[in-house]
Image (cartoon, coloured by chain):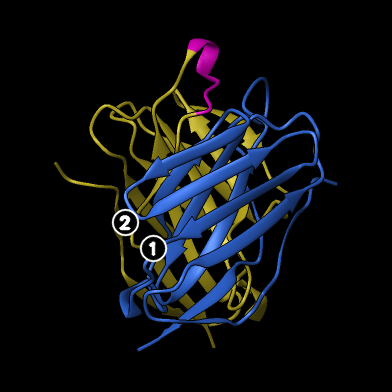
Chain colours: A yellow, B blue
Amino acid sequence: DAGVTQSPTHLIKTRGQHVTLRCSPISGHKSVSWYQQVLGQGPQFIFQYYEKEERGRGNFPDRFSARQFPNYSSELNVNALLLGDSALYLCASSLVGTYGYSNQPQHFGDGTRLSIL
Amino acid sequence: QKEVEQNSGPLSVPEGAIASLNCTYSDRGSQSFFWYRQYSGKSPELIMSIYSNGDKEDGRFTAQLNKASQYVSLLIRDSQPSDSATYLCAVNPGSGAGSYQLTFGKGTKLSVIP
Protein backbone atom coordinates (compact mmCIF):
# COMPACT_ATOMS: atom_id res chain seq x y z
CA ASP A 1 0.00 0.00 0.00
CA ALA A 2 1.17 3.50 -0.77
CA GLY A 3 2.31 5.63 2.11
CA VAL A 4 1.83 9.35 2.52
CA THR A 5 2.86 11.11 -0.66
CA GLN A 6 4.00 14.71 -0.86
CA SER A 7 4.81 16.97 -3.76
CA PRO A 8 6.99 18.57 -4.81
CA THR A 9 10.10 17.00 -3.29
CA HIS A 10 12.17 20.15 -3.48
CA LEU A 11 11.26 23.75 -4.10
CA ILE A 12 13.26 26.94 -4.39
CA LYS A 13 11.51 30.27 -3.98
CA THR A 14 12.48 33.87 -3.35
CA ARG A 15 11.35 36.12 -0.55
CA GLY A 16 7.81 37.45 -0.92
CA GLN A 17 6.63 34.64 -3.16
CA HIS A 18 3.82 32.19 -2.47
CA VAL A 19 4.09 28.40 -2.28
CA THR A 20 1.62 25.51 -2.29
CA LEU A 21 2.59 22.09 -0.98
CA ARG A 22 0.49 18.99 -1.51
CA CYS A 23 -0.15 15.82 0.41
CA SER A 24 -2.07 12.60 -0.14
CA PRO A 25 -2.70 10.51 2.97
CA ILE A 26 -2.49 6.77 3.37
CA SER A 27 -5.63 5.12 2.05
CA GLY A 28 -8.22 5.02 4.83
CA HIS A 29 -6.61 7.81 6.83
CA LYS A 30 -8.92 10.81 7.16
CA SER A 31 -6.72 13.06 9.27
CA VAL A 32 -3.84 15.06 7.87
CA SER A 33 -1.37 17.12 9.86
CA TRP A 34 1.38 19.45 8.72
CA TYR A 35 4.71 20.01 10.44
CA GLN A 36 7.71 22.24 9.84
CA GLN A 37 11.16 20.94 10.62
CA VAL A 38 14.19 23.21 10.58
CA LEU A 39 17.69 21.80 10.72
CA GLY A 40 18.63 20.43 14.12
CA GLN A 41 15.12 20.65 15.55
CA GLY A 42 12.20 18.29 15.90
CA PRO A 43 9.12 18.80 13.73
CA GLN A 44 6.85 21.61 14.85
CA PHE A 45 3.09 21.30 14.46
CA ILE A 46 1.43 23.69 11.99
CA PHE A 47 -2.10 22.39 11.25
CA GLN A 48 -4.36 19.40 11.57
CA TYR A 49 -7.36 18.74 9.35
CA TYR A 50 -10.12 16.20 9.63
CA GLU A 51 -13.24 16.02 7.46
CA LYS A 52 -12.17 19.22 5.71
CA GLU A 53 -12.21 21.18 8.96
CA GLU A 54 -9.25 22.67 10.79
CA ARG A 55 -9.02 20.88 14.14
CA GLY A 56 -5.77 22.34 15.39
CA ARG A 57 -3.33 25.12 14.64
CA GLY A 58 0.17 25.60 15.93
CA ASN A 59 1.96 28.85 16.67
CA PHE A 60 2.44 30.00 13.10
CA PRO A 61 1.51 33.33 11.49
CA ASP A 62 -1.52 33.85 9.29
CA ARG A 63 0.72 33.62 6.25
CA PHE A 64 0.31 29.89 6.70
CA SER A 65 -2.98 28.33 5.66
CA ALA A 66 -4.18 24.90 4.65
CA ARG A 67 -7.20 23.02 3.46
CA GLN A 68 -8.39 19.48 3.03
CA PHE A 69 -10.31 18.11 0.09
CA PRO A 70 -13.17 15.57 -0.06
CA ASN A 71 -10.67 12.82 -0.95
CA TYR A 72 -8.75 13.74 2.28
CA SER A 73 -5.75 15.11 0.42
CA SER A 74 -4.48 18.43 1.66
CA GLU A 75 -2.63 21.58 0.63
CA LEU A 76 -0.43 23.84 2.72
CA ASN A 77 -0.08 27.40 1.49
CA VAL A 78 2.49 29.91 2.62
CA ASN A 79 2.31 33.54 1.50
CA ALA A 80 4.92 36.28 1.57
CA LEU A 81 7.76 33.86 2.06
CA LEU A 82 10.56 34.78 4.45
CA LEU A 83 14.08 33.41 4.66
CA GLY A 84 13.07 31.77 7.95
CA ASP A 85 10.48 29.66 6.15
CA SER A 86 13.27 27.54 4.71
CA ALA A 87 12.64 24.09 6.17
CA LEU A 88 11.45 20.57 5.56
CA TYR A 89 7.66 20.52 5.47
CA LEU A 90 6.18 17.25 6.56
CA CYS A 91 2.71 15.89 6.09
CA ALA A 92 1.42 13.11 8.33
CA SER A 93 -1.76 11.08 8.20
CA SER A 94 -3.49 8.96 10.80
CA LEU A 95 -6.64 7.06 11.60
CA VAL A 96 -9.25 8.82 13.68
CA GLY A 97 -11.51 7.90 16.54
CA THR A 98 -14.75 9.31 17.81
CA TYR A 99 -15.36 12.97 17.02
CA GLY A 100 -12.11 13.15 15.09
CA TYR A 101 -9.87 12.68 18.10
CA SER A 102 -7.35 9.93 18.13
CA ASN A 103 -4.19 8.73 19.78
CA GLN A 104 -3.21 6.72 16.73
CA PRO A 105 0.31 7.04 15.38
CA GLN A 106 0.96 9.56 12.66
CA HIS A 107 2.78 8.41 9.56
CA PHE A 108 4.93 10.88 7.70
CA GLY A 109 5.55 11.44 4.04
CA ASP A 110 9.00 12.11 2.61
CA GLY A 111 8.50 15.84 2.96
CA THR A 112 9.01 18.89 0.79
CA ARG A 113 12.30 20.68 1.23
CA LEU A 114 11.66 24.39 0.75
CA SER A 115 14.53 26.79 0.24
CA ILE A 116 14.01 30.53 0.25
CA LEU A 117 16.61 32.71 -1.47
CA GLN B 1 3.90 25.41 27.23
CA LYS B 2 4.12 21.70 26.58
CA GLU B 3 7.72 20.56 26.28
CA VAL B 4 9.53 17.37 25.38
CA GLU B 5 13.17 17.14 26.38
CA GLN B 6 15.82 14.86 24.93
CA ASN B 7 19.58 14.75 25.24
CA SER B 8 20.79 15.87 21.83
CA GLY B 9 23.84 13.63 21.97
CA PRO B 10 25.62 12.41 20.01
CA LEU B 11 25.32 9.09 21.78
CA SER B 12 27.98 6.68 20.62
CA VAL B 13 27.73 2.95 21.28
CA PRO B 14 29.75 0.02 19.94
CA GLU B 15 28.11 -2.42 17.58
CA GLY B 16 26.23 -5.11 19.51
CA ALA B 17 25.74 -2.97 22.62
CA ILE B 18 22.48 -1.64 24.07
CA ALA B 19 21.62 1.96 23.21
CA SER B 20 19.46 3.79 25.75
CA LEU B 21 17.59 6.91 24.67
CA ASN B 22 15.65 9.03 27.14
CA CYS B 23 12.86 11.57 26.99
CA THR B 24 10.95 13.62 29.56
CA TYR B 25 7.75 15.57 28.98
CA SER B 26 6.03 18.38 30.82
CA ASP B 27 2.31 17.74 30.17
CA ARG B 28 1.24 15.34 32.93
CA GLY B 29 -2.01 14.60 31.09
CA SER B 30 -0.25 13.18 28.02
CA GLN B 31 -1.50 9.77 27.02
CA SER B 32 0.29 8.67 23.85
CA PHE B 33 4.01 8.41 23.25
CA PHE B 34 5.93 7.65 20.10
CA TRP B 35 9.48 7.09 18.99
CA TYR B 36 10.49 8.01 15.47
CA ARG B 37 13.76 7.33 13.71
CA GLN B 38 15.04 9.92 11.25
CA TYR B 39 17.97 9.30 8.97
CA SER B 40 19.87 12.33 7.75
CA GLY B 41 17.92 14.08 4.99
CA LYS B 42 14.92 11.79 5.39
CA SER B 43 11.54 12.05 7.08
CA PRO B 44 10.65 10.57 10.50
CA GLU B 45 9.77 6.87 10.52
CA LEU B 46 7.59 5.45 13.31
CA ILE B 47 9.34 2.68 15.23
CA MET B 48 7.41 2.40 18.51
CA SER B 49 4.25 3.61 20.19
CA ILE B 50 3.39 3.16 23.86
CA TYR B 51 0.30 4.14 25.83
CA SER B 52 0.50 2.38 29.20
CA ASN B 53 3.05 2.32 31.98
CA GLY B 54 5.63 -0.41 31.65
CA ASP B 55 7.58 -1.95 28.83
CA LYS B 56 6.65 -2.69 25.24
CA GLU B 57 8.94 -4.81 23.12
CA ASP B 58 9.14 -5.06 19.34
CA GLY B 59 12.10 -6.98 18.01
CA ARG B 60 15.30 -5.28 19.14
CA PHE B 61 13.39 -2.24 20.40
CA THR B 62 11.86 -1.78 23.85
CA ALA B 63 9.91 1.31 24.84
CA GLN B 64 9.48 2.08 28.53
CA LEU B 65 6.92 4.48 29.99
CA ASN B 66 6.63 5.90 33.49
CA LYS B 67 3.80 8.43 33.62
CA ALA B 68 4.37 9.25 37.29
CA SER B 69 7.91 10.36 36.46
CA GLN B 70 6.86 11.78 33.07
CA TYR B 71 9.56 9.74 31.45
CA VAL B 72 9.75 7.57 28.37
CA SER B 73 12.74 5.71 27.04
CA LEU B 74 13.79 3.57 24.09
CA LEU B 75 16.25 0.70 24.33
CA ILE B 76 17.88 -0.71 21.24
CA ARG B 77 19.47 -4.11 21.79
CA ASP B 78 22.27 -5.51 19.64
CA SER B 79 22.81 -2.09 18.07
CA GLN B 80 23.81 -2.12 14.41
CA PRO B 81 25.53 0.56 12.32
CA SER B 82 22.23 0.86 10.41
CA ASP B 83 20.64 2.12 13.65
CA SER B 84 22.75 5.27 13.39
CA ALA B 85 20.18 8.03 13.08
CA THR B 86 18.41 10.72 15.07
CA TYR B 87 15.68 9.38 17.36
CA LEU B 88 12.74 11.67 18.00
CA CYS B 89 10.46 11.37 21.01
CA ALA B 90 6.91 12.59 20.36
CA VAL B 91 4.08 13.11 22.83
CA ASN B 92 0.36 13.38 22.10
CA PRO B 93 -2.22 14.49 24.67
CA GLY B 94 -4.32 11.67 23.27
CA SER B 95 -7.78 13.06 23.80
CA GLY B 96 -9.79 16.14 23.20
CA ALA B 97 -8.85 19.11 21.13
CA GLY B 98 -5.22 19.01 20.18
CA SER B 99 -5.00 15.27 20.19
CA TYR B 100 -3.22 15.36 16.85
CA GLN B 101 -0.67 17.90 17.89
CA LEU B 102 2.38 15.81 18.35
CA THR B 103 5.00 17.65 20.37
CA PHE B 104 8.50 16.51 19.45
CA GLY B 105 11.78 16.69 21.26
CA LYS B 106 14.83 17.91 19.38
CA GLY B 107 16.02 14.35 18.94
CA THR B 108 19.01 12.33 20.08
CA LYS B 109 21.65 11.51 17.49
CA LEU B 110 22.81 7.92 17.84
CA SER B 111 26.05 6.67 16.32
CA VAL B 112 26.77 2.94 16.36
CA ILE B 113 30.47 2.28 15.93
CA PRO B 114 31.43 -0.92 14.02
The residue positioned 31% from the left and 75% from the top of the image is B82
Residue A40 location (% of width, % of height): 61, 77
The residue identified by callout 2 is A6
Query: Mark 1 belongs to which amino acid?
Result: Gly
Q: Along the line of sight, which residue is nearer the eye, B13 or A68?
A: B13
Cα separation, mark 2 vs mark 1, equals 6 Å
Q: Is residue B37 above or below residue B56?
A: below
Quarter holding residue B44: bottom left
Q: Which quadrant holds the C terminus of chain A?
A: bottom right
Q: Magenta stretch containing residue A45, yes or no?
A: no
Contact between labelled residues 1 and 2, with CB atoms less than 8 Å apart = yes
Q: Along the line of sight, which residue is nearer the eye, A82 or A72?
A: A72
Q: Residues within 10 Å of mark 2 (few under 14, many from 20)?
A: many
Query: For residue A111, which numbered disc appears in the image?
Result: 1
Horizontal side of residue B87 vs A42, given as left or right: left
Query: Mark 2 belongs to which amino acid?
Result: Gln
For label 2, the SS is strand
Chain bearing mark 1: A
Horizontal side of residue B107 vs A106, given as left or right: right
The residue positioned 14% from the left and 41% from the top of the image is A1
Bounds of the magenta segment: A98-103
Q: Is residue A108 above or below residue B80?
A: above
- The answer to whether residue A17 shows anywhere in this view is no
